[in-house]
Every structure is written in structure tokens, then in C-alpha cells.
């Protein structure tokens, strides 16, 4: 499910999981709690539309990136593939004036995280949100934003081969993050490089990939923000989850909107029920459904600050 690209005013119903499934909006519980696990056509269309938007950007001419966002001076080769990737880096406001070490969050679709000038239909405002958290809560974090691969985006983020989209290249993309970008970041910047201080986050296909990444490499990532996940892409992601329960210390934060297509809410609920059935601690599993929220950066931006606070504190 990728961005329909319409902004919404979200009426939030935050449901922190306790011991029973708590990821349905109260106003629609009767309609959605037993929703079919079959993907709704609207959900797939949202993702397809977003894939097209990623290939045909209409950027703004005015940069909104804060001064502490930088494009790294090197582009990174994707292992096994004939392409490179640009990386955008957010450093805490006082990074150059202190000697502290910081946790790190790896995020996808770097073009959309910090800057209207490079985003497709608005940005996540990650830099503004984190600057505010640093000022108000002394919460500081390094964010590594990895640009998407344009027309290769869906096969890089899709963990499995797909009849329509082709052979998956997600293992190469995961290796890019773990074996190429992360060592560079840990070598050149003051990071807390251990698994406890390393997270991954993304939306739509990036949400699907973030789920795949933490379940595939829980030795690297201990927390994941899984926004509007494209679980429609392959049923194999449910088998992966079933067969590989996470360490009890891992933290998962799911987010979905009720206007992203009925299949997204149903699939997210299905995944959360599966994780609950494995007795994953309720304090480390959170799910939020936002009534009337659509599939776009405005929605994801509205929840980013509370997500990173919960994930890293």
C-alpha cells in the first residue's frame, strides 16, 4: 500500500495493547474486527499509486530541511546489484558541541523524511520533530535516511518474489543497510552501535520491509516502527513471523489508518494477533488505528514523535 497522497485530518484512537487485541478504532470495531484477511482492492491500489508517484516526483523548489540534516559525501553500492544509494543523515542539534553517543534509527524513502524539496507529496518532518524532542525532552537520536531506488523501490522493499513485480531484491537492500551503511555510520559518527540502540522504521512497503528486517535480523534491530504495512504483498511474511518469534525485549509499533483500504486494517490486526499468540510482552507491542487517516506522509508525520519516544525510551 503506497501513498494515495491525499492529506488527512486524523482523529486518533490510541490503543496500547494489553493482553487482548487493541488495534481497532472504537467507532468501527463491529465492522472491522472480523474483517476478511483477503486484501481489499483499495489497499493494493494505494500501494500501486504510490509506486508510480515514487517514479514521477513533483518536488517543491524550497528546501525545508533543517541545518542538522546532511547528505553523506559518498553514495553506497548496493551489494550484488549495479546501483548506488544516496543517504541523508540527521544528527542531534548539539552533536558538534558534545561527546555523547547516540542510538540510531534507520529509515527508508530518505527523500521523503526531511525535505519538501525532495519529497513526493510532503515530508515526514523527522528533523523538526526530533529537534523539538531534543529541546523539550532532551531526547536525542541519529536518523539514517536511505533514499529509495525509484523504479526498483518495490522489489528492493518487497521481501519475496511477486508474480506481478518480479524477483525480490530485498536481501541485497538489507545487506546494504547492515553490511555497508551501518558500519560506515558506526565508524564515522558517535553511535551506540549495539542491537539495543538500533531501530528500523518505514511506511507502506517500507513498513513491510521493516517488519521483515527485524524478524530476519533481530541481532541487529531491537525495535521497529511498522507504519501502514503492505502485508498484502505476500502471505509469506506471516509464516516468517510465526516461525521466528522475536526476543521478548524487541519493541514493535504498528500504525494504520481506517481509510487506507479495509485490507490494511485487517492484515495489521491479523499480524498483531499472531504476535500476541506468541506471548510477546504487551509492554513491547503497540498498535494504533487512526480513524479517517489515509495513506500519506502527513499521517505518518503526525505519529513519528510519539513512536520514537516509545521505541527508544
Image (cartoon, rainbow, N blue to C red):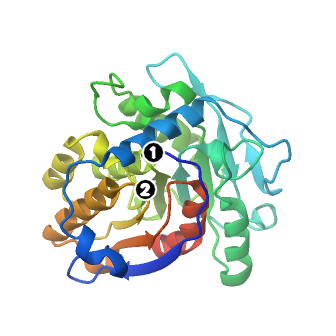
Residue at position x 68%, y 68% in the image: 129
Q: In this view, does 146 lie above or below 194?
A: above
Which residue is identified by label 2?
260
Q: Seen in the image, is 175 located left or right of residue 74?
A: left
The circle drawn on residue 46 is 1
Residue at position x 33%, y 44% in the image: 41
Q: Determine the CA span between mark 2 and mark 1.
A: 7 Å
The secondary element bearing badge 2 is classed as: loop
**Residue 120 image position (x, y, % from top left):** 66, 42
One can see residue 246 in this view: no
The circle drawn on residue 282 is none
Q: In this view, does 133 lie above or below 188?
A: below
- Pick whichever, 6 or 187, lies toward us: 6
**Residue 168 image position (x, y, % from top left):** 34, 27
Q: In this view, does 92 lie above or below 137?
A: above
- Pick whichever, 52 or 22, lies toward us: 52
**Residue 26 image position (x, y, % from top left):** 34, 81
- Pick whichever, 262 or 253, lies toward us: 262
The reply to whether dot 2 and dot 1 touch (C-beta < 8 Å) is yes
One can see residue 230 in this view: yes
Residue at position x 42%, y 37% in the image: 157
Q: Quadrant of residue 279?
A: bottom left
Question: 10 Å neighbourhood of mark 1: few (<14), some, or many (≥20)?
Answer: many
- Pick whichever, 246 or 29, lies toward us: 29
Amino acid at each position: 500500500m503506497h501513498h494515495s497522497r491525499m492529506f488527512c485530518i486524523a482523529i486518533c484512537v490510541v490503543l496500547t495493547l494489553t493482553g487482548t487485541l487493541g488495534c481497532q478504532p472504537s467507532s468501527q470495531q463491529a465492522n472491522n474486527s472480523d474483517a476478511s484477511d483477503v486484501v481489499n482492492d483499495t489497499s493494493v491500489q494505494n500501494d500501486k499509486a504510490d509506486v508510480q508517484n515514487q517514479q514521477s516526483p513533483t518536488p517543491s523548489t524550497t528546501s525545508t530541511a533543517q541545518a542538522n540534516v546532511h547528505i553523506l559525501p559518498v553514495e553506497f553500492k548496493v551489494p550484488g546489484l549495479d546501483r548506488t544509494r544516496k543517504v541523508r543523515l540527521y544528527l542531534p542539534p548539539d552533536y558538534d558541541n558534545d561527546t555523547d553517543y547516540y542510538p540510531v534509527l534507520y529509515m527508508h524513502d530518505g527523500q521523503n523524511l526531511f525535505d519538501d524539496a525532495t519529497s513526493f507529496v510532503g515530508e515526514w518532518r523527522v528533523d523538526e520533530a526530533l529537534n523539538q524532542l531534543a529541546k523539550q525532552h532532551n531526547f536525542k537520536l541519529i536518523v539514517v535516511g536511505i533514499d529509495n531506488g525509484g523504479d526498483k523501490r518495490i522489489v528492493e522493499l518487497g521481501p519475496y518474489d511477486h508474480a506481478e513485480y518480479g524477483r525480490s531484491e530485498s536481501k541485497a537492500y538489507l545487506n546494504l543497510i547492515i553490511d555497508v551503511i551501518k558500519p560506515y555510520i558506526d565508524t564515522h559518527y558517535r553511535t551506540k552501535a549495539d542491537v539495543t540502540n538500533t531501530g528500523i522504521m518505514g511506511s507502506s512497503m517500507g513498513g513491510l520491509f521493516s517488519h521483515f528486517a527485524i524478524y530476519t535480523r533481530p541481532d541487529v534491530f531491537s525495535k521497529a516502527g511498522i507504519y501502514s504495512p503492505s502485508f498484502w504483498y505476500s502471505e509469506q511474511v506471516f509464516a516468517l513471523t510465526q516461525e521466528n518469534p522475536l526476543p521478548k525485549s524487541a519493541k514493535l509499533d504498528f500504525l494504520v489508518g481506517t481509510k487506507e483500504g479495509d485490507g490494511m486494517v485487517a492484515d495489521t490486526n491479523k499480524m498483531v494477533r499472531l504476535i500476541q499468540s506468541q506471548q510477546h510482552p504487551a509492554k513491547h507491542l503497540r498498535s494504533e488505528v487512526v480513524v479517517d487517516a489515509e495513506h500519506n506522509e502527513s499521517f505518518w508525520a503526525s505519529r513519528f514523535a510519539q513512536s520514537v519516544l516509545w521505541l527508544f525510551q
